[in-house]
């Protein structure tokens, strides 16, 4: 090892992580995405400091007023400040987006890796279910599961998580099949490692990169799904501010207070775009071949 | 080709059966049971029992399953829990509107998306490519229903160019097209983003291949090289991905129908979900499932047409 280094003095060792970071930071779109995500997270966390008004404070006499002093985007059908509700809406969007992807991602990864690792009947059963679930578009699955579970934040997270899980299972399954026969896994097994350890320590970390990209892209989709289901009325329940719900309530008043519906849509669009940019950048950094 | 087609059709049957089974299971794991859910918590025991009998929920599960499948074979989707009308009648009314919307959106996506993909691939890393990529990523991030609302606001509310509600009558093609325009454009533009982005990356791969260089070396015109050599090869992955996009389009059409108050399967389903009309929900899911299996089948068949190799596998 030392000898090899001596004969090749010009080669400097660059750690994998360092190289990834370098490719990632060279991608301007990815950096923009990262910055946007950071800003949105900040807005969600600091909502009480940033929002000019209480998002739940009603004022019946001032309902559906156009933008005015102190209310830059106007007031909604209960006289609540639209800007403050959009700022607080970031909380629902991020909470549902991130928690449902974490839940669905963990469940799906477990399904995919266990199926690939165990093989046999376990694999056939799990992957058959995954295939059938993947046949449906995410919105239809989400709609059906949300309908079965009922509305509300927790059920919404469950519904979106269950919709996302098979997508992670599919991606985690393939590499597991080839990884489980690799020498380093055999070596660990020979040293007495149990199945659980083999999966968690030797297999999952090797699939982690792809799953991270998937997580970022699916956070974008989960936020879109949250808004879509809330738009239908199966998502976040009033009075908790949610962009999808605001867009729906505002649609009826498109003629008199268009910003009621259009402004939360812009927040939604930018948030989804931010996670898509981030995911794209991560993918390019992790797989230079895919870089177009 | 005939053997390949027959094989594909036969393979679709077990898939369809699996999907139908899953729908059957999901609708039956409703907490409590569908009858109580439909009638509400305050319904009398007798009323719930009567409804359970009417829905066949008092029978053993396997009998229900066989009834469900044999009903489907006879084209009987059961009756709505709310209106007691056969569900098939409602679906027969809604389905053409959804198909019309989906077909129009896919056509818009293909007609705009493929040229955009080819141009941005050929002009890689130029201003055209850059603008195209930014727009397509924005398109991917646009929730279809929000794009619909934006179009509705500008074209219907402000400029009054298009109607805001409903769908035209099929007997009046012009009015029908007028009603279809905005919903179809809102879904079609998003399709354009997906198809354009995918066409670009596939074309970039193909353009780097040896036979493209050979074709150029032979002195063929740029046009022939692009369309006959590169695009023909790129079509193979494009076909399978367009199938996937068509399926996800069915999902986004649900919200578009609601935004534009258009009759259609999606609006029917959301209405049924709100009223807890589980027979209708189940039936619409069945129709969606048939749709999806059908689109996959068509994708496989077209795949066989563009890539002769798969027919012999």
Image (cartoon, coloured by chain):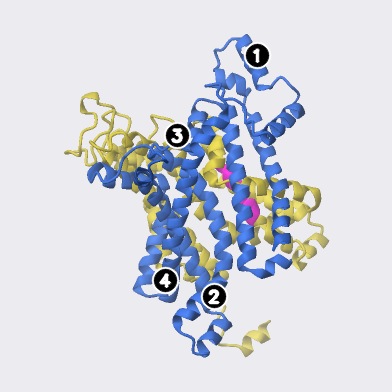
Q: Give the colour chain B carries in the figure.
A: blue
Viewer can see residue B163: yes
Q: Which residue is mark 4?
A: B120
Range covered by the magenta-colored residues: A160-171
Q: Residue at x 31, y 44 (%)?
A: B152
Q: CA distance from mark 3 to mark 2?
A: 45 Å
Contact? badges 4 and 1 (CB < 8 Å): no
Marks 4 & 2 on one chain = yes
Q: Give the colour chain A carries in the figure.
A: yellow
Q: Which residue is mark 2?
A: B206
Pointer 3 chain: A
Against A195, is B34 above or below?
A: above
Crowding at dot 2, Cα within 10 Å, few <14 / some 14-19 / many 20+, comes out as many
Q: Name the mark on residue B251.
A: none
Magenta stretch: dominant secondary structure:
helix
- Using the image as rendered, state which of residue A188 and residue B305 is in the foreground: B305
Pointer 1 chain: B
Q: Secondary structure beneath disc 2?
A: helix
Q: Residue at x 41, y 67 (%)?
A: B116
Position of residue A136 measured from the top left corner of the image (x, y, whole percent): 59, 46
Marks 3 & 4 on one chain = no
Q: Name the mark on residue A236.
A: 3
In what quadrant of the picture does the C terminus of chain B appear?
bottom right
Q: Which comes before the other along the chain, label 4 or label 2?
A: 4
């Amino acid at each position: 090892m030392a000898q090899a280094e001596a004969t090749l003095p010009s080669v400097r060792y660059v750690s994998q992580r360092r190289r990834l970071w370098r490719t990632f930071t060279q991608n301007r779109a990815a950096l923009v995405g990262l910055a946007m995500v950071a800003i949105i997270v900040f807005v969600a966390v600091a909502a009480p400091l940033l929002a000019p008004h209480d998002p739940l404070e009603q004022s019946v006499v001032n309902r559906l007023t156009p933008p005015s002093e102190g209310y830059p985007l106007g007031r909604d059908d209960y006289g609540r400040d639209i800007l403050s509700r959009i700022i607080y809406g970031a909380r629902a969007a991020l909470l549902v987006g991130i928690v449902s992807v974490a839940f669905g991602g963990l469940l799906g990864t477990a399904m995919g890796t266990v199926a690939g690792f165990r093989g046999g009947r376990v694999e056939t059963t799990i992957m058959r279910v995954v295939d059938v679930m993947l046949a449906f578009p995410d919105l239809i699955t989400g709609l059906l599961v949300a309908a079965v579970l009922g509305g509300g934040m927790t059920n919404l997270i469950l519904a979106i998580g269950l919709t996302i899980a098979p997508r992670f299972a599919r991606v985690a399954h393939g590499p597991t099949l080839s990884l489980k026969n690799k020498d380093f896994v055999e070596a660990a097994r020979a040293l007495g490692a149990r199945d659980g350890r083999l999966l968690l320590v030797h297999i999952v970390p090797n699939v982690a990169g792809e799953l991270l990209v998937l997580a970022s892209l699916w956070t974008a989709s989960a936020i879109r799904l949250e808004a879509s289901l809330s738009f239908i009325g199966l998502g976040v329940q009033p009075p908790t501010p949610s962009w999808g719900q605001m867009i729906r309530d505002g649609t009826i008043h498109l003629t008199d207070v268009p910003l009621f519906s259009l402004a939360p849509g812009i927040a939604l669009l930018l948030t989804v775009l931010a996670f898509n940019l981030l995911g794209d950048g991560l993918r390019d950094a992790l797989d230079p071949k895919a870089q177009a | 080709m005939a053997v390949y087609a027959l094989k594909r059709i036969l393979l679709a049957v077990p898939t369809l059966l699996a999907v139908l089974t899953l729908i059957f299971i999901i609708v039956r794991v409703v907490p409590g049971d569908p009858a109580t859910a439909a009638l509400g918590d305050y319904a009398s025991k007798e009323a719930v029992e009567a409804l359970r009998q009417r829905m066949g929920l008092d029978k053993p599960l396997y009998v229900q399953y066989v009834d469900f499948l044999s009903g489907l074979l006879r084209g009987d989707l059961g009756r709505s829990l709310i209106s007691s009308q056969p569900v098939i009648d409602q679906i027969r009314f809604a389905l053409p509107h959804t198909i019309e919307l989906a077909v129009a959106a896919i056509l818009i996506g293909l007609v705009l998306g493929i040229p955009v993909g080819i141009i941005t691939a050929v002009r890689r890393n130029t201003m055209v490519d850059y603008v195209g990529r930014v727009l397509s990523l924005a398109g991917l991030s646009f929730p279809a229903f929000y794009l619909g609302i934006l179009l509705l606001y500008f074209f219907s509310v402000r400029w009054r160019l298009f109607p805001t509600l409903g769908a035209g009558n099929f007997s009046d093609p012009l009015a029908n097209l007028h009603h279809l325009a905005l919903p179809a454009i809102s879904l079609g533009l998003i399709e354009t983003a997906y198809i354009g982005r995918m066409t670009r990356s596939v074309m970039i791969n193909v353009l780097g291949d040896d036979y493209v260089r050979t074709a150029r070396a032979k002195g063929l015109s740029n046009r022939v090289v692009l369309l006959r050599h590169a695009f023909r090869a790129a079509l193979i992955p494009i076909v399978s991905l367009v199938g996937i996009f068509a399926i996800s389009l069915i999902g986004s059409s649900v919200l578009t129908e609601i935004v534009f108050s258009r009759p259609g399967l999606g609006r029917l389903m959301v209405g049924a979900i709100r009223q807890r009309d589980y027979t209708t929900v189940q039936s619409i899911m069945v129709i969606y499932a048939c749709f999806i299996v059908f689109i996959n089948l068509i994708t496989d068949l077209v795949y066989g047409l563009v890539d002769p190799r798969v027919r012999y596998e």
